[in-house]
Amino acid sequence: MPEEEELGPLPAGRHGFTREQVAAHQRERLIAGLAEAVAEHGYNAVTIGHITKAAKVSRRAFYAQFQSKEECFLAAFEVVVAHMRELITEAVDPIPDWPHRVVAGLRALLGFLASDPTLGRLCLVDSLTAGPAIAARFGEAIAGFRPLLEPGRAERRSPRPLPDSTEDSLIGALATLISRSIASGDAERLTTLLPDFVEFVLMPYLGPEGAHRLAREVR
């Protein structure tokens, strides 16, 4: 998502931008404005007026881009999720072994959420109370992180198979723990939880000793 200082109002008059460029700029401003407004008021209390005021665009500009605040929220949610995926992919791609890929992915995720609690709150807190359509999309997005963990099944030495729901349970538990930290105002501390999260996530695949050893590496 563009930095806030990069989203100043368009210059008045003949600025030389195409209609498509103006629309794209306004859409970016509205997405950023929604994130700001939701952080201040909470999703249920946010109005179109709050969003357009934060974005510094007109209501007409809002309705040229979105039919409702729910549609605007979904657009913002998609931007944040896509950015998180990009950060995680960049972090894990250079790493050859699976356990350290998980460590790198968790580090990238926690670092982003700690650095921008507003977007973290939008994605992991407000999305759960913003209506059934958004909650359903949240579930789909969470499931999209399953491929990062599934290769761990090949690392498991125990003959007992893992339940099919293992990855969903781990990701859901992580999302809950992270959202609690963000909701309580402790997002900046998320990076300090990396060792605990590493041990928790890796334990079903590497066993207690292997997971603990990896967790000690990142303390």
Image (tube, rainbow, N blue to C red):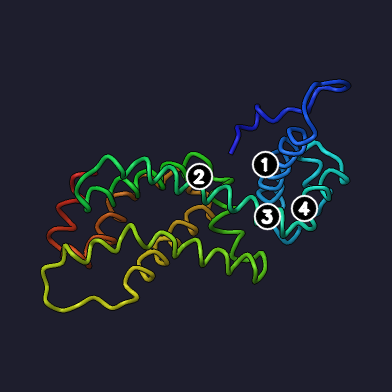
Q: Quadrant of the N terminus?
A: top right
Describe residue 99's horizontal placement relative to residue 108 as left or right. left
Residues packed near mark 3 inside 10 Å, few (<14), some (14 to 19) or many (20 plus):
many
Per the image, label 2 sits on a secondary structure element best described as helix
Q: CA distance from mark 3 to mark 4?
A: 10 Å
Residue under label 2: 83
Q: CA distance from mark 4 to mark 1?
A: 14 Å
Residues packed near mark 4 inside 10 Å, few (<14), some (14 to 19) or many (20 plus):
some
Residues packed near mark 1 inside 10 Å, few (<14), some (14 to 19) or many (20 plus):
many
* Residues under numbered marks 4 and 1 in contact, where contact means CB atoms less than 8 Å apart: no
Residue under label 1: 32
Residue under label 4: 66
Describe residue 57's horizontal placement relative to residue 187 as left or right. right
Residue under label 3: 73
Front residue of 51/196: it is 51
Instruction: Identify which amino acid the numbered label 3 is placed on.
Output: Phe
Sequence-wise, the earlier of marks 2 and 3 is: 3
Q: CA distance from mark 2 to mark 1?
A: 14 Å
Sequence-wise, the earlier of marks 4 and 1 is: 1
Sequence-wise, the earlier of marks 1 and 3 is: 1
In the image, residue 67 lies at what x, y percent? Answer: 80, 57
Front residue of 197/15: it is 15
